Amino acid sequence: MSKVIDSVRPVVETIIDEHGDMLVDMEYVKEKGQKYLRIYVDRQPNGIDIDEIAALSELVSEKLDALDPDLLPDPYVLELSSPGAERPIKTKADWEKALNDYIHVGLYQKIENKKMYEGTLKSYNDDEVVLEIKDKTRRKTLTVPRKLIANIRFAIEF
């Protein structure tokens, strides 16, 4: 399935870049017997709106349908959408955007008796992530080794 993504990505990325938008992620998956090409796009600084998503979807669909040879010969459903406010942090751009932002971290094993933390990302490197978290009525700094992170995503602070 990743071969399909590798071959389709340059075509999709060109269209998205020409519109001043950003390709966040792509996936080509099979669910309940149906194949899906999912493309997640965003626009800085305020996000992407439904009209822009519809326009990009139409352009991407037309371009993919016109390719010869067909890079997606099997029937598939094209889904183009915003990645959402609580999307995973994956790329270098995501990490840069997440700096000083509120995030959620899920762990493989407990640190201070907890496997989940939410807080402000204060710094990061290849080895660790530093969060400022709320601990009852005070704020404190928590350093999390990257090897313990099961998942990390943007979060909405309440």
Image (tube, rainbow, N blue to C red):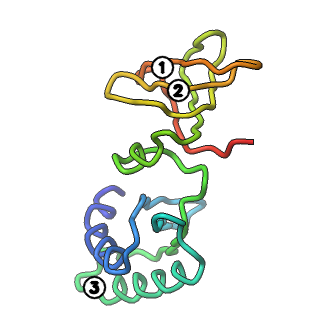
Residue, far front: 138
Is 55 placed left or right of 51 in the picture? left
Say which amino acid is labelled 3. Answer: Leu
Q: Which residue is tagged 3?
A: 67
Q: Which residue is tagged 2?
A: 131
Residue, far left: 69
Q: Which residue is tagged 1?
A: 144
Q: Residue at x 52, y 36 (%)?
A: 152
Q: Which image quarter holds the C terminus? A: top right
Q: Residue at x 54, y 19 (%)?
A: 141
Residue 97 in percent (x, y) is at 44, 48
- Disc 1 from disc 2: Cα separation: 8 Å
Is 70 placed left or right of 23 in the picture? left
Q: Secondary structure at mark 2?
A: strand
Q: Residue at x 48, y 26 (%)?
A: 149
> What is the crowding at mark 2: few (fewer than 14 residues within 10 Å), some, or many (at least 20)?
many
Q: Which mark is residue 41?
A: none
Say which of marks 1 and 3 sits in front: 1
Residue 23 in view, yes or no:
yes
Say which amino acid is labelled 1. Answer: Val
- Disc 1 from disc 3: Cα separation: 46 Å
Q: Are marks 1 and 2 in contact (CB under 8 Å)?
A: yes
Q: Secondary structure at mark 3?
A: loop
Say which amino acid is labelled 2. Answer: Leu
> What is the crowding at mark 1: few (fewer than 14 residues within 10 Å), some, or many (at least 20)?
some
Where residue 147 sits, quadrant-wise, is top left
Q: Secondary structure at mark 1?
A: strand
Say which of marks 1 and 2 sits in front: 2
Q: Which image quarter holds the N terminus? A: bottom left
